[in-house]
Image: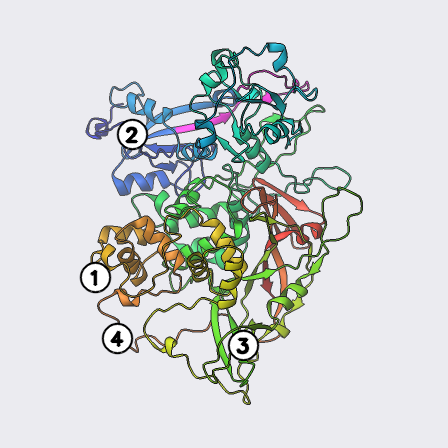
Amino acid sequence: MSCPHVGSANLAKPSPTDNVYREDCTQCFDSIDDPAGLDVCLKCFNGGCAGDRNHAKLHATSRNHPLVLNIRRTRKIIERNEPPLKMSKLAIAAETESDRYDTTLTVKCLDCGIGNLSKEDATIAPVIDAVMKANTFSRKEEVKAWEQELTTCEHILTMQQGEPRKIESQDLGHCSKCDLNENLWLCLECGNLGCGRAQFGGVSGNSHGLAHATETKHGVAVKLGSITPEGTADVYCYNCDEERIDDNLGAHLANWGIILAEREKTEKSLTEMQIEQNLKWEFSMTTEDGKELTPVFGPGLTGLKNLGNSCYLASILQCLYDLPSFQHRYYGDKLGPLPSVPDPAEDLETQLRKLGDGLLSGRYSKSDTDVFASEHTPNVPYQKGLQPSMFKHLMGRGHEEFSTMRQQDAFELLQHLIKLITRSKHPAELGDPTQPMRFVMEQRLQCLNCKKVRYSSNEQDSVFIDVPMEKLPPEEEGQEPKYKPVTLKQCLDSLTASEVVELTCAGCGSKDGFTKRQAFKTFPDVLVVNARKMAVVNWVPVKIDVPVIVDDEPFNLDEYLSKGQQPDEEALPEDESAKSNSPAFVPNAEALAMLEAMGFPRVRGEKALHATGNSDANAAMEWLFAHMDDPDIDVPLDLSASSGGAASGGAGAADPEKLAMLESMGLSGPRAVKALKETGGDVERAIEWLFSHPDDDGADAVEEEAPAGNEGPKKEAGSSELPAKFQLQSIVCHKGTSIHAGHYVAFIRKKLSEDETSWVLFNDEKVVKVVDVEEMKKTAYVYFFKRV
């Protein structure tokens, strides 16, 4: 049957820059693996579910794009009655999609209702071929995940190799200092062969390659088993202590008689092992007697697939969507239809609601296996897991760190998401889902001389606690250091303890200093706590596993409520600089002095304190380590009202198109206008400016201010009502020596039935019931406490 739309559709093949959504729907997580399959628009390549939700039909109607390619994928059943072959030292071959799946393609016109147009049509055939060959949206992200931003270095560029000679094949078989025959590194300067460091997954190593580099100062080595005929290989510079690229690797190897075309890759690369390590950190996936933990399924029990270094995102999303406010805001029939937007994958509201449906409905929480279990292949039917590729791309767009595929700090991501969501538009009847996290901290300063006081308050959505670190005596020589456990109460006592700071009193002029103490002015409904367990080792922040003891039963925080200014206390006169309209910034003198003592230039210290709230040297130090490569890191801080005027071209109106781009990410209003003006109209820099200036309301950027009195005073966040009892609801745990590496998981208290409440482990796509969570609570990185 012919269709009139084929001739008039003006179809074109997707270009390399086009996003082809041919795996899952852009508005829900229905995919090509569902019985109805996925309809890919042959005009704009949007993916729409073909089942009962009709997202493909809605797209076709709203955009007048009726022609679609329906893709259905079904598993090939593999029955294993024999144990799999042992891996041998052969070239690594990847299993292809066609080895695991059968794929069915059908061309349809959703307007005419024709369900089987000819795939051989001259207009349609080349487009189908291009769609199926194009990288999918998630594949584009995965490609980034497996690539590191590697460069060469001066030691490679200036390397002087020894006299050319052919290293005989028998001499390439084992380390020159031991009998190890794998994980071998060839010194490109002298031809020595040494074993590498021991690696995750049982890869042996005695570090003889490193010892050779230390003794001879020969810095550049290549891993023999990683060399491919195409010229790629693991190249490491011991002088830089970094993985590098050698653009002349072929010539450097030929100096030792090794010909690239004759090589075959036999071992995993460093990148592959790092990814494998991140994916396979063991988080008690077995009971004490070695049995696999029981998978659980149902609403609120859906896993998220690891996209490669995305466990930090999955763990935070699981904790957020466990909160009643997020469930109310982003899931349920009360929400009405999804926004009608040109590109659903680029709309924050759509993607947040897509996640809500995916994680909370239970629709996708089902076992997934294509292997029949037998006595030789015990198999726990975990979930397939949802791929949050579209959301990850959207929330990271324009952000220096979250736009990459590198592992990130889960708590920094939480703060980033809170900012994005807070600045989005929320219907009055639904509200901002981050509001229950907000509360007010109050700081009390008292002059040591005249005893006058000053109270100031700051609205927050989380609190940092510094965890005291006290090493325990080693039980045996050479043992990794262990640390004395501390209680959550000890950490909160430290947070709210009084301290002396060196400041000059505006009332009496004394330089004796002040006592400073902070406490809760109000408490939130959900208290988010970040436990900082960082120590600086050789100028590198290293995470220390200090056990923190947290009660499972509700506990009281009444003692941490601020009493406020008392009748017998006299207030200090208001600081004149605070009265002016100048946005002058005075760095915390004590914190700045600590940063300078650590070797940071004053300019950098001031910038870091301004970016982190001007109170904590540790937080400022962590910010500095994360922003060392910023091009303007040494540009003095300038907060004057006129700064940026030249760059912004005066006070002209912001570009409406650029404003629309910011608004699509939930960044709107006077703040967006000011951000564009301050950054010369650069959208990416404007986004960064917005996140680094959370307290700037942008009021001075608009020419006409709203008439005074239109709005009443803003309601104070949180509540000061007592008792303030809290109970641990969820935690994000981390394993690894750095918060930017290793692996994150979430443990959440879930009601599994009317009679059962249990802790559940969300380890990417694996969702299992946990018997004992006490050890995990001790090593948690982020805590979510609910008020009870």
Return the x and y of residue 159 as percentages of the image width and height: 47, 25
Front position among marks 1 and 3:
3
Query: What secondary structure is the magenta-colored segment mainly?
Result: loop
Looking at the image, is mark 3 or mark 2 earlier in the sequence?
A: 2
Q: Is residue 87 magenta?
A: yes
Colour logic: rainbow
The local secondary structure at tag 3 comes to: loop
Q: Residue at x 38, y 76 (%)?
A: 578
Front position among marks 1 and 4:
1
Q: Residue furthest right?
A: 475
Q: Residues within 10 Å of mark 4 (few under 14, many from 20)?
A: few
Q: Amino acid at mark 1?
A: Ala
Looking at the image, is mark 4 or mark 3 earlier in the sequence?
A: 3
Q: Is residue 257 above or below residue 118?
A: above
Q: Which residues are magenta?
A: 71-93
Q: Amino acid at mark 2?
A: Ser
Q: Of the numbered discs in the image, which one, if any, rests on residue 707? A: 4
Front position among marks 2 and 1:
1
Q: Residue 757: tell me if it is visible.
A: no
The reply to whether discs 1 and 4 touch (Cβ–Cβ < 8 Å) is no
Q: Residue at x 35, y 45 (%)?
A: 346
Per the image, the residue denoted by label 2 is 15
Q: CA distance from mark 1 to mark 4?
A: 21 Å
Q: Residue at x 25, y 19 (%)?
A: 122
Q: Of the numbered discs in the image, which one, if any, rests on residue 651? A: 1
Return the x and y of residue 392 as percentages of the image width and height: 44, 44
Front position among marks 3 and 2:
3
Per the image, the residue denoted by label 3 is 513
Give the quarter of the figure containing the N terminus. Answer: top left
